[in-house]
């Protein structure tokens, strides 16, 4: 076991409580010593329940008073880069919820700060850690799929707008709608499975058609804090097309609200030897064997005791302790935000954007 690492949290909202808190408290090498939230009472309730000694409403004060090894950032998107840079400069390793930042410039500022500080910066890419994704990555790397030359990915909700009127739907704070909220998850997963080719051109379109619709059929609409008569200046549907430096392409589609049959998330890849899909967490591989078209469905045994968010957090700790090499890098995060930014730019300009 490595040395005990002191952890400070910035942002104690839904994603922290539902996906970060338990894994952090259960890890034998971690000690959560401080919580920070601009709404101090939220942090105080959690600290009292979970016996966490220090609570702050200003992250700068927390960084100044606590000698932290790790800072975990679960704030609204706008604050990711600001808090990450400050934490890195204070000498802490940083783990941050997705997206990396709200602009390529801010994502690059985070990456540069990590290099200058000599500290690890990692942003949540939990979908890489599912059993299905890990299997498919190995299947591809072993050459069974051949050349992965195209694919498509998306997350479509029928009605599932999170925190309507709050920071999720306020572009200044979030950076955008479902493209930046959901797109990071599956665009990243697809690109990682494809071998991390470099994006070179993007074309996209965005739509806002359900800003005045109050219906909901998705548990994901419970994220964020709704505000009556709040702001809704982001898209509710985004589509796009990405070209990579190796000639591969990727189609994307993400919605918080659209008239589809059911909520669906998916990644589909086409290779010269085999294709594959992960839909709603189920993996299938499409190939040919013994002269016949063949569908393969791997059987995963055993019950997972740690969710994918927790797996990524534990991987981060392994990297900090020198036991592992980071599965994702700040440079990949910069490329991701460049893609998202270019889709918005393409939608506004009505033309393809070169990266």
Image (tube, rainbow, N blue to C red):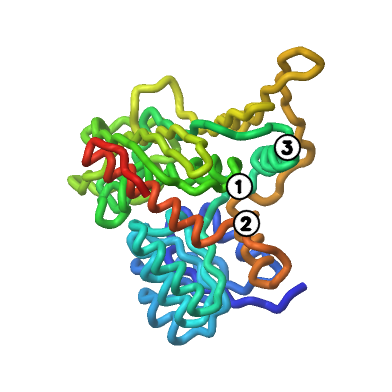
* Callout 2: SS: loop
Q: Residue furthest right?
A: 290
Q: Which residue occupies the foreground of this view, 300 or 212?
A: 300
Q: How far across and down, in percent of the image, does residue 354 sit?
A: 34, 46
Residue underneath mark 1: 128
Cα distance between the residues tagged 1 and 3:
19 Å
Residue shown at 58%/52% (left/top)? 309
Between 268 and 282, the one nearer to me in the picture? 268
Give percent across and percent down for residue 153: 49, 34
Q: Residues within 10 Å of mark 3 (few under 14, many from 20)?
A: few
Image location of residue 211, percent across then percent down: 23, 36
Of the residues tagged 3 and 2, which is closer to the observer?
3
Image point (39%, 40%), residue name? 221
Badge 1 crowding class, 10 Å Cα cut-off, few under 14, some 14 to 19, many 20 or more, is many
Q: Quadrant of residue 273?
A: top right
Q: Nearer the viewer, mark 1 or mark 2?
A: 2
Q: Is residue 193 left or right of residue 37?
A: right
Residue at image location 46% in from the left, 86% down from the top: 65
- Separation (CA) of disc 3 from disc 2: 20 Å
């Amino acid at each position: 076991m490595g040395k005990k690492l002191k952890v400070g949290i910035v942002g104690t909202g839904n994603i922290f409580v539902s996906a970060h808190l338990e894994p952090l408290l259960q890890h034998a090498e971690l000690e959560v010593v401080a919580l920070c939230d601009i709404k101090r009472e939220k942090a105080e309730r959690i600290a009292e329940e979970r016996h966490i000694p220090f609570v702050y409403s200003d992250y700068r004060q927390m960084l100044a008073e606590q000698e932290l090894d790790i800072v975990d950032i679960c704030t609204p998107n706008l604050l990711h880069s600001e808090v990450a840079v400050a934490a890195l400069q204070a000498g802490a390793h940083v783990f941050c919820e997705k997206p990396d930042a709200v602009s390529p410039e801010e994502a690059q500022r985070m990456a540069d700060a990590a290099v200058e500080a000599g500290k690890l910066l990692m942003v949540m890419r939990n979908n890489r850690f599912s059993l299905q994704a890990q299997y498919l990555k190995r299947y591809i790397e072993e050459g069974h799929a051949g050349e992965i030359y195209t694919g498509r990915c998306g997350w479509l909700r029928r009605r599932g707008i999170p925190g309507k009127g709050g920071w999720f739907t306020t572009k200044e704070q979030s950076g955008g709608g479902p493209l930046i909220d959901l797109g990071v998850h599956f665009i990243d997963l697809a690109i990682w499975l494809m071998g991390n080719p470099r994006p070179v051109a993007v074309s996209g379109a965005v739509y806002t058609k359900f800003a005045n619709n109050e219906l909901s059929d998705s548990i994901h609409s419970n994220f964020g804090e709704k505000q009556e008569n709040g702001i809704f200046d982001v898209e509710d549907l985004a589509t796009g097309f990405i070209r990579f430096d190796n000639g591969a392409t990727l189609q994307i589609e993400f919605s918080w609200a659209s008239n589809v049959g059911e909520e669906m998330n998916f990644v589909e890849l086409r290779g010269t030897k085999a294709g594959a899909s992960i839909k709603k967490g189920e993996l299938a591989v499409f190939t040919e064997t013994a002269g016949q078209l063949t569908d393969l469905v791997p059987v995963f045994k055993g019950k997972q005791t740690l969710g994918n968010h927790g797996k990524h957090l534990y991987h981060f700790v392994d990297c900090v302790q020198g036991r592992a090499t980071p599965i994702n890098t700040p440079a990949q995060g910069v490329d991701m935000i460049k893609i998202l930014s270019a889709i918005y730019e393409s939608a506004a300009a009505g033309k393809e954007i070169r990266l």
